[in-house]
Image: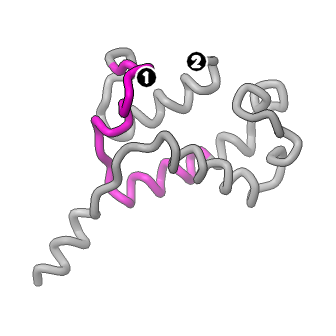
Amino acid sequence: MNDETKIIFKEMCSRVGAEYDKINFQEENWYSKYQWTQEVEEEFKIWLSEHIYNLPMKRLRLLTDFPYIIRKRKKQSKKFANEIVNIYGWKTIENKNNKENENN
């Protein structure tokens, strides 16, 4: 795993209280061991798209073969962040507040 991917995965782990060093990312379905709410997922996507948008080209190349498409284009950074979360993100559960509102 390259340095930039580690930064992203460490941040992803911190959002759910997971210990990055204790997760075997080579294990099948490693991403299904933790869950986050839709709200936490959206906050992470915002962080990730900003992170991607602000990466120097050299570091952006560690994440994609097409850095010029993403570089300094907010819309493309958001799209790329969504793709990363869709592939590697934790299982998404309903927000607790939404569930409480449905019960009232």
Question: Could you say where residue 58 lies in the image, as x and y percent from the top left?
Answer: 82, 25
As drawn, which residue projects farthest toward the right?
68
Q: Could you say whether the residue bearing mark 1 is in a helix, strand or loop?
A: loop
Q: Is residue 100 left or right of residue 29?
A: left
Q: Which residue is mark 1?
A: 25
Question: Which range of residues does the magenta coloring cover?
Answer: 23-48
What residue lies at 74% left-to-right and 45% top-to-bottom? 53
On-image quarter of the C terminus: bottom left
What is the three-letter code of the residue carrying label 2?
A: Met
Q: Quadrant of residue 59?
A: top right
What residue lies at 47% left-to-right and 33% top-to-bottom? 11
Q: Is residue 55 left or right of residue 102?
A: right
On-image quarter of the N terminus: top right
Q: Quadrant of residue 96?
A: bottom left
Question: Could you say where residue 83 lies in the image, as x and y percent from the top left?
Answer: 60, 50
Is residue 34 covered in magenta? yes
As drawn, which residue projects farthest toward the front?
28
Q: Could you say whether the residue bearing mark 2 is in a helix, strand or loop?
A: loop
Q: Earlier in the sequence, mark 1 or mark 2?
A: 2
What residue lies at 43% left-to-right and 22% top-to-bottom? 25
State yes or no: discs 1 and 2 in contact (Cβ < 8 Å). Answer: yes
Q: Which residue is mark 2?
A: 1
Question: Could you say where residue 57 lies in the image, as x and y percent from the top left?
Answer: 84, 31
